[in-house]
Image (cartoon, rainbow, N blue to C red):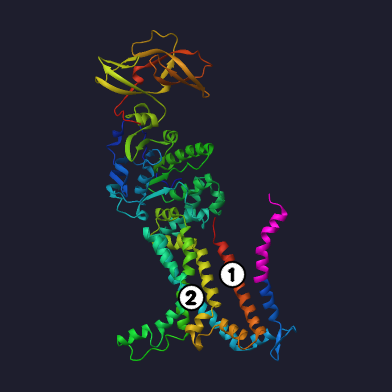
Amino acid sequence: MKTYAKPPAKEWDHDASTTARAGADPLLEVRHVAKRFGGREVLRDISLDVASGEFLTILGESGSGKTTLLRLIAGFEQPSNGEIWMSGERLDTQPPYRRRVNTVFQSYALFPHLTVAENVAYGMRVQGVPRAEIPPRVAEALAMVKMSASAETPPARLSGGMQQRVALARALVNRPKLLLLDEPLSALDANLRRQMQTELKALQREIGITFLFVTHDQDEAMALSDRIALLRAGALEQIASPREIYNSPTSAYTAQFIGQTNLLTAQVSGGTARAGCLLWPCAAPEGPATFSLRPEHIRLVDGASGGNPASCRFRAKLENQTFCGSTDMLEIVSPDGQHLRVRVPSRGILEDEVDLEFSAKDCVRLRDAGSS
Amino acid sequence: MYSRAYKLAISLPPLAWVTLFLLAPYALMFMHSFWTVQDNQIVHTWSLNNYAKLVASPVYVQVLLRSMWIAARVTLFALLLGYPLAYFLSFHAGPRKELLYQLVIVPLWVSYLVRGYAWKTILGGDGVLNGLLQFLHITQHPVEFLLYSPFAVVLTLTHIYTPFTFLPIYASLEHIPRNLVEASQDLGASPRATFWRVILPLSVPGLLAGATFAFVLTLGDFLAPILVGGPGGTMISNIVQTLFGAAYQWPLGSAIAVCILVLVLGLLFATERVERKWTFS
């Protein structure tokens, strides 16, 4: 692996805000990019920076425009508006074959008429890498993805997971500045998928190439990314580290898309937020507000009264209890009829009435409560 | 599952058809090729005389070689026209694709004879082309070599069989997943390199099928030589036709037909093998 330049030692502060790396020059800059197909607006005013060595995930449901954004960066589509820059050079005016960007396609797109080794050698051949240099680099890339044994096999004889590895080797062997991955794991079964996630992350750390990863799977995004860019209907909803985006979602959409949550519609007045019968101290400005409260932030307690002043205790009716292994998911109804979800450590069958508590600090006020 | 009787009942009509109208005539032709004609009667005595005559007489071999040479040229020109056309339609025609496809197909609906006669009126001594040449004072007198020559046969058959090469090539180009083209460019290959390294290799089956169509159909053609060929443009099928007609030499004609059949079957067998080698699932 010595031929791959080690990235500058860099420890991402997961809880820092997105402006943490403003000082360093970004590798990739997407500036006010929009894309229309006919009259349909697929991407609207997208701006984001990707730092060198970063693992950035573009997350969104199908139709949110995430693949289109990737194709704009790869050069298969032209932006209708805006610019894309890489290392201080304009990228979007270059044809795809001049961009130091490689793609791992969702369906792998391996050349069926070439062997695995020839597939991996393809990029170096067409770019005129000296002949003597090619075989050792192919061998090295195949070893990296543990596919050395299949070098002379045609890709059609390989399983999906193996084809995936070859596609990865074929892209990485060219030492791109930026690797684009378009839902590369979506065709794999759950076990293989988890294994490939781990390997992918380890590989990215080891070779230090910047990864731009597209997925619709929020768990995958959380597990892999330095930062997540959440797309919603062609617009950037929020971009932050997994922790920040989970702990401090700015919108109801983000809060519900990344993990599960309870949305509390409350009225803030005199330092107190009131959502029906639920009251907690709150420093937010006066007026109506929506809060996100994660199910795991509500806990079971003994007795409906007491507790500290920075929390809210209430008694609720238990509607449903689902066993999920180490935790139980409870569906409860507050006395005034609010349905909430609660995740607690498993502890056997509960009574019909339960006492619950949450801390005021766990209620995250959403800046944009918009419909979800 | 279906019963044996049912399977037999539904496969019997096509089997009978093939036997009656394909296998039986071939068998008859094969048998004729070993018989002889005496006093204007076909005599059922078995011998290899007909085949010996074919090998001994240079005229048959010569015409066969000429026919193959014409077929080879028609194949080459039909591919040179058909491939770029199919490539353009498949990759660069955009929304006009369907319309252009229909336009390529339309000539197939026009009768072969009409197309043959059309070339006659274009190439003839008082034809459209000569009229134009004289009008432009490029030539003083009608140019004779245009019509009634191997050139005219090659031109006419190229026109007629180009759609036959276009169709399989177009089909194979349409089957190439477009993300392979994107992957090639993504890995740094220019459009030209992508064509030579990805598109052309993956279209080999269509290319071979198209070439086979053009070559085999030309080799068996006898109308174009009659319409525009002249004495120098005679092809092997014209000889067969004559032997079966006025000359009343069915046995000799059958022997030639058997030779052509073996040649064509060998060719089909060879291209089939190559095609299979270049087909990837």
Task: Where is residue B53? Give x, y as percent.
Answer: 66, 87
Measuring from the top left, give residue A321's x and y in whole percent.
Answer: 50, 20
Tell me: residue A39, above or below residue A11: below
In the rendered structure, the answer to whether residue A178 lies left or right of residue B268 reads left
Callout count: 2
**Residue at position x 46%, y 86% from top?**
B148
- Chain of the residue on which disc 2 is drawn: B
User: How dense is the environment of label 2, judged by Cα within 10 Å: few (below 14), some, or many (20 and up)?
Assistant: some
The span picked out in magenta is B1-21
Task: Tell me if B154 is positioned left or right of A367 in this view.
Answer: right
Residue nearest the observer in this picture, A274 or A69:
A274
Q: Is residue A89 above or below residue B125?
A: above
Quadrant assignment for the C terminus of chain A? top left
Residue A88 in view (yes/no): no
Based on the displayed image, in which of its 4 quarters is residue A250 positioned?
top left
Marking on residue B268: 1
Query: Amino acid under label 2?
Result: Tyr
Say which residue label 2 marks: B112
Whether discs 2 and 1 lie on one chain: the answer is yes
Local SS, label 1:
helix
Q: How many residues crowd around disc 1 within 10 Å: few (fewer than 14), some, or many (20 or more)? A: some
Instruction: Between label 2 and label 1, give the one nearer the viewer.
Output: 2
At label 1, which amino acid type do we have? Answer: Leu
Q: Chain of mark 1?
A: B
In the displayed structure, A310 sits above or below B62; it is above
CA–CA distance in space, label 2 to label 1: 24 Å
Residue A8 percent location from the top left of the image: 36, 40
